[in-house]
Image (spheres, grey):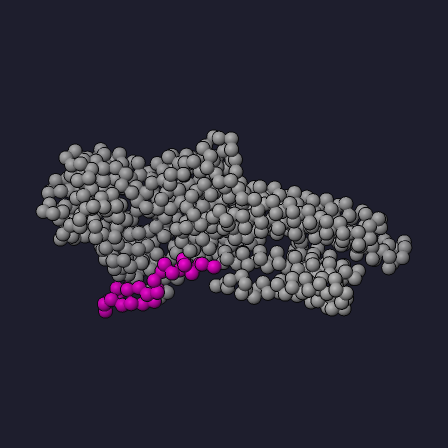
Amino acid sequence: MRPPWWRDPALLPSAISGVMLILGYGAAWGGHVTVASGLHWTALLVGAYTFVPTTVLRLVRRRTGVGLLMTIAAVGAVILGHVGEAAALAFLFSLSETLEDRAMDRAKEGLRALLSLIPDTARVQRPAGEESIPVTQIIRHDVLIVGAGDRIATDGVVVEGLSSLDTSAVTGESIPVSVEPGDEVLAGSVNGSGTLLVEATADGRDNSLTQIVTLVEQAHAKKGERARLADRIARPLVPAVLVAAALIAALGIIVGDPGVWIERALVVLVAASPCAMAIAVPVTVISAIGSASRYGVVIKSGQAFEQLGTIRTVALDKTGTLTRGEPQVVEVVSTSHTAQELLGYAAAVEASSSHPLAGAVTVASPQTLPGSDIEEVAGRGVIGYSGSVRVRVGNTRWLDPGEYRADSERMAAQGISVIAVEAAGTLAGLIGVRDELRPESAQTIAILNDMGIDTVMLTGDNQRTAHTLAAQAGIVDVRAGQLPKDKAEAVASLSRSRPTAMVGDGINDAPALATATVGIAMGARGSAAAIESADIAFTGDDLRLIPAALAHARRGRRIMTVNIGLALAIIVTLFPLALFDVLGLAGVVLVHEIAEVLVILNGIRAARRPAPVLTEPGSDRRT
């Protein structure tokens, strides 16, 4: 794990370089020229150590970037006797690169959280009896014994037993799924109250959960190849400047004084060095990232911030992102009892159950006292007594809805999980439970549409639930029944056509978050793996942070583009002036310093905190 920034050894060279640079300026101001020179040389060498070796390695691989121009500019400044200027360039570029690397390293952490969902050992049925073995030794066709509350060690098929599985970590399904013999189960799912025998269909080392880790790692490797804006601009600039300087020196040697023209070529190199560009992007990014963090948006890198400003499509997970992630009672149907009476019967026998649907019922009837003689029927429901009344509560496969069948089918069509309640041997009614949309979901989607951004829902939930909630939120493009690999493939496909952000909060979202142009994790309740796989994390749950962050990034990108344009304009202006000796080295350095001040002041504007996106859909106000 990375240490805090003040104890991070990776930042030490930049810190030493900065301190030596400041001390050198102080010594020079005090008239101690020799001491100042020594301090500046130290600052230069220590700062250059952080990026020159990498630049040389990239050059060997025929890849160029801002680092090469910064290296050449520093060398040129030294040759012309301006060690202090070279040290300043080395320090500034070293600091910006090191901070960027530190931020990007965060994306590589947290994958252990994915594998932690797989237990270390598993119970396996053998001819001689039950045996506990390391999960890595599981092979296909082994029969696993999965007790109540156990995590399933690898993918398989139920061969015996009834139970319900919490698959939220793997598929994002908010409601536990009942399983029986013949049903497929996924590694990492948590078993309910029943004991299951599961025949393994995948080895312990290669299952759906370990594949998530592989997908995340592959996605990060691909994303690491994306060039930043400054590097994309520098790519054609570097060879052009080098060729121009070489031609100047060569022609000068032929037609004039070699010493004069070689020096002039070096001045041209300094004039064409992207000093302002090297500062323009980091200043803007740091200002904007710092501002965003103050209103709950943690942006992990400058590259992520740049990419965020280009987003044209937002893909959203359903459970825990668009919805609250907590099932709630949304409907009660009964012709013989009041809603509170029906909820009271159900809550009495559900009070001791850990099932999420039971939790929703007990929350809806908080004053109900626990029942007695409670017996849980795995994969079906609960039996017990509420006072002297015998009560059964369970799914409609166990308790026939009878006269309420039409209501049961209607609720199921709306994506509502149906609980049947039987009291004193008679079906008393139905309770509908669903994970409801967040109150701001529809508004957020409308704001994104107003910004010209398309929205897509990706969820592991079933088609009916997904389409019902998507219609309420205003999302047209719905893709349900998505496993982690499916989500990653969908996001990859979307990203190929338009820059795409993925918003999610679960471990099952990790591959898609890593694959997207920008991954955004709902951090307040999100899993560690999702947060670490994402490029951006929200510390709160308000979905309106999404359009606010996008608007903030768009503004920052505009400021960054202006700064880069100014930096390029300085280069274009200084190049002929240096070439024809209108400006010497001192003049060139002075103009560069003025340009740096201008881009810094402009970049600081990105720190302005955006107004919260609280407008009603269709209004003219924008963040």
Residue in the picture at 68% in, 62% down: 22
Residue 420 visible, this angle: no
Q: Is residue 360 left or right of residue 51?
A: left
Q: Is residue 158 left or right of residue 534?
A: left
Residue with the most extreme right position: 256
Q: Quadrant of residue 479?
A: top left
Q: Quadrant of residue 445?
A: top left
Residue in the picture at 62% in, 50% down: 283
Residue with the most extreme front position: 30
Q: Is residue 253 left or right of residue 541?
A: right
Residue in the picture at 43% in, 55% down: 529
**Percent coordinates x, y for residue 79 in the rendering:** 78, 62
**Percent coordinates x, y for residue 286 in the rendering:** 58, 51
**Percent coordinates x, y for residue 332 in the rendering:** 23, 37
Residue with the most extreme left position: 388
**Percent coordinates x, y for residue 275 in the rendering:** 70, 52
Residue in the picture at 31% in, 39% down: 415
Any magenta on residue 124? yes
Residue segment shown in magenta: 109-135
Any magenta on residue 131? yes
Residue 448 visible, this angle: yes
